[in-house]
Image (cartoon, rainbow, N blue to C red):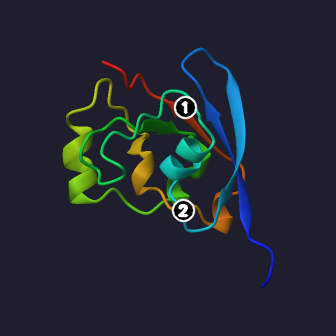
């Protein structure tokens, strides 16, 4: 069995602290955060795009590399606090090789 493919991600917490993690290909960005105990990614619905507690702001240089926002994700993003043009639910972002170095800032998910 070959070595697992990993991609480096950086999560920036509300306090500005950076957390670098290695994420497996095909996992979600939310799962990578959850598996690494990154604070601020609550993931209360377990990744079903039903709660908004994994809301992140994607570094603009990576926006065009992501899958477009689905209708379900878009609906949930209407409910989050402080939605921005680069807001995404990290449970809907699949880790892939092109996202090496992805930087996301964790939104204020505890309201």
Q: Quadrant of the C terminus?
A: top left
Identify the disc placed on residue 27.
Answer: 2
Outermost residue, bottom direction?
1
Residue 87 horizontal/vertical position (percent): 40, 39
**Which mark sits nearer the N-terminus, 2 or 1?**
2
Residue 49 horizontal/vertical position (percent): 29, 50
In depth, the one of 14 and 45 nearer the eye is 45
Q: Nearer the viewer, mark 2 or mark 1?
A: 2
Relative to 49, say whether 5 is above or below.
below
Badge count: 2
Residue drawn at x 59%, y 36% is 37
Crowdedness near tag 2: few (<14), some (14–19) or many (≥20) residues, C-alpha within 10 Å: some
Q: Quadrant of the N terminus?
A: bottom right
Residue drawn at x 63%, y 67% is 25
Q: In this view, does 10 lie to the left or right of 54?
A: right
- Residue at disc 2, secondary structure: loop
Relative to 3, say whether 69 is above or below.
above
Residue 40 horizontal/vertical position (percent): 48, 27
Q: Distance between the residues labelled 2 and 1?
A: 18 Å
Residue drawn at x 68%, y 67% is 97
Q: In which quarter of the image is residue 3?
A: bottom right
Residue drawn at x 39%, y 41% is 43
Q: Quadrant of residue 18?
A: top right
Relative to 14, say whether 89 is above or below.
below
Q: Name the residue under label 1.
A: 105
Outermost residue, top direction?
15
Q: Is residue 36 left or right of residue 43?
A: right
- Residue at disc 1, secondary structure: strand
Crowdedness near tag 1: few (<14), some (14–19) or many (≥20) residues, C-alpha within 10 Å: many
């Amino acid at each position: 069995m070959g070595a697992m493919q990993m991609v480096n991600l950086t999560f920036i917490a509300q306090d500005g602290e950076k957390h670098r993690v290695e994420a497996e290909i095909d996992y979600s960005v939310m799962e990578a955060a959850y598996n690494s105990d990154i604070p601020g990614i609550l993931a209360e619905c377990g990744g079903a795009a039903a709660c908004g507690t994994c809301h992140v702001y994607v570094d603009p240089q990576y926006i065009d590399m992501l899958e477009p926002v689905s209708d379900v994700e878009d609906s949930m993003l209407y409910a989050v606090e402080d939605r921005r043009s680069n807001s995404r639910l990290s449970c809907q972002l699949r880790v892939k090789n092109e996202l090496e170095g992805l930087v996301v800032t964790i939104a204020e998910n505890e309201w």
